Amino acid sequence: MQVEAIYENGKLEFVKPLKLKHQRVRLVVTVPDEEVDVSLRDLVSEEVLLRARAMREHLDAVRDAPLPPDDALPDLTPKQIDRIKAFELREDR
């Protein structure tokens, strides 16, 4: 059953009165993401944040690296050529 409630200072108040069979009931509450005030630091350790930052910097460096000129690219391997041909066959269908 879905019911609407308002959260205020740690308490839920049902919009329409609701009589429950027991004094204590476990509920699942959906809270809009924009209403949650939580810092990433509250969720993960400093070590994880440092590793994530290092990974992001590495990824940014790879993305921002200039492409080599065509004449500096290595020759295609037989496996790469087979894959290119396979994709060409797919396009022909």
Image (spheres, rainbow, N blue to C red):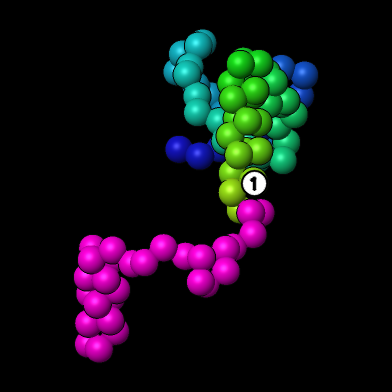
Query: Among all residues in the image, which is located at the extreme front?
Result: 71
Q: Please tell me how many numbered marks the rendered image carries.
A: 1
Give yes or no for residue 40 being in the magenta stretch: no
Identify the image quadrant of the N terminus. Answer: top left
Q: Tell me: residue 79, above or below residue 93.
A: above
Say which residue appears at 57% left-offset and 69% top-offset. 69
Q: Indicate the secondary structure of the residue bearing disc 1.
A: helix
Q: Image check: 39 left or right of 87?
A: right
Read off the residue under disc 1.
Answer: 60
Who is closer to the viewer here, 31 or 42?
42
**How crowded is the residue under tag 1: few (<14 C-alpha within 10 Å), some, or many (20+)?**
few
* Residue 35 location, quadrant: top right
Q: Position of residue 8 (x, y in %)?
A: 76, 24
Q: Nearer the viewer, residue 5 or 53?
A: 53
Give whichever of 20, 64 is nearer the camera.
64
Q: Where does the image place residue 5, in percent across and percent down from the top left?
A: 65, 33
Q: Going by the picture, which residue comes out furthest to the right?
A: 9
Q: Residue at x 22, y 82 (%)?
A: 89
Q: Is residue 90 above or below residue 14?
A: below
Q: Residue at x 24, y 77 (%)?
A: 85
Q: Quadrant of the C terminus?
A: bottom left
Residue 83 appears in the figure: no
Is residue 62 visible to the viewer in this orientation of the structure? yes
- Residue type at tag 1: Asp
Residue extending farthest to the top is 23
Q: From the viewer's perspective, is 84 left or right of 48?
A: left
- Given residues 74 and 51, the one toward you in this image is 74
Quarter of the image holding residue 10? top right
Q: Residue at x 66, y 54 (%)?
A: 64
Q: Which residues are magenta?
A: 64-93
Q: Give yes or no for residue 80 being in the magenta stretch.
A: yes
